[in-house]
């Protein structure tokens, strides 16, 4: 692991009880990566931070349309999500609808979702 990664302190965004978050956290800990965990429910999510995610990754990538939270929405609400502002409003209202985990290191591209080989590559490159 490079000195830059140690000094940058990656931030892992998500929700504590999510199984995929648990896998990502376990992997980072096994790789001895120091990181900060930001739980959308406990730590909150403001519009500026969410908009920075949307600017880099796009609202379509961030919106988890495969999860339970999305499936529980009525059809009218789902159909109303057609652009970044409508998606951001929903994500701020219901952070569990954001795809996770999101791993961020200042100055580096964000990594959305968890895949062990992608995480290893991410750690090795930063």
Image: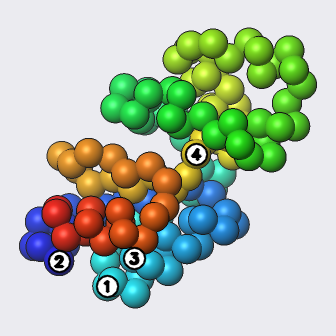
Q: Is residue 81 left or right of residue 57?
A: right
Residue sitting at x 21%, y 48%: 108
Disc 2 to disc 1: CB gap under 8 Å: yes
- First of labels 2, 1 by sequence position: 2
C-alpha gap between disc 2 and disc 3: 11 Å
Residue 20 versus residue 103 in the image, above or below: below
Which residue has dot 3 on it? Answer: 28
- Numbered label attached to residue 1: 2
Q: Give the colouring mode of the picture.
A: rainbow
Disc 1 to disc 4: CB gap under 8 Å: no
Q: Secondary structure at mark 3?
A: helix
C-alpha gap between disc 4 and disc 3: 18 Å
- First of labels 4, 2 by sequence position: 2
- Numbered label attached to residue 99: 4
Measuring from the top left, give residue 23's x and y in whole percent.
55, 74
Residue sitting at x 40%, y 34%: 57
- Numbered label attached to residue 32: 1
In terms of image quadrants, where is residue 6?
A: bottom left
Q: Secondary structure at mark 1?
A: loop
Q: Is residue 60 left or right of residue 49?
A: right
Front-most of residues 118 and 10: 118
Residue sitting at x 35%, y 63%: 118
- First of labels 1, 4 by sequence position: 1
């Amino acid at each position: 692991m490079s000195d830059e990664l140690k000094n940058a302190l990656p931030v892992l965004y998500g929700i504590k009880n999510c199984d995929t978050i648990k896998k990502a956290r376990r992997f980072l800990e096994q790789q001895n990566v120091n990181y900060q965990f930001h739980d959308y429910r406990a730590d909150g999510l403001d519009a500026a931070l969410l908009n920075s995610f949307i600017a880099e990754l796009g609202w379509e990538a961030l919106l988890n349309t495969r999860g339970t939270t999305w499936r529980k929405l009525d059809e009218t609400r789902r159909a109303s999500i057609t652009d970044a502002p409508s998606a951001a409003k929903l994500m701020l209202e219901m952070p569990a609808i954001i795809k996770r985990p999101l791993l961020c290191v200042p100055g580096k591209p964000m990594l959305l979702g968890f895949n062990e080989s992608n995480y290893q590559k991410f750690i090795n490159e930063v």
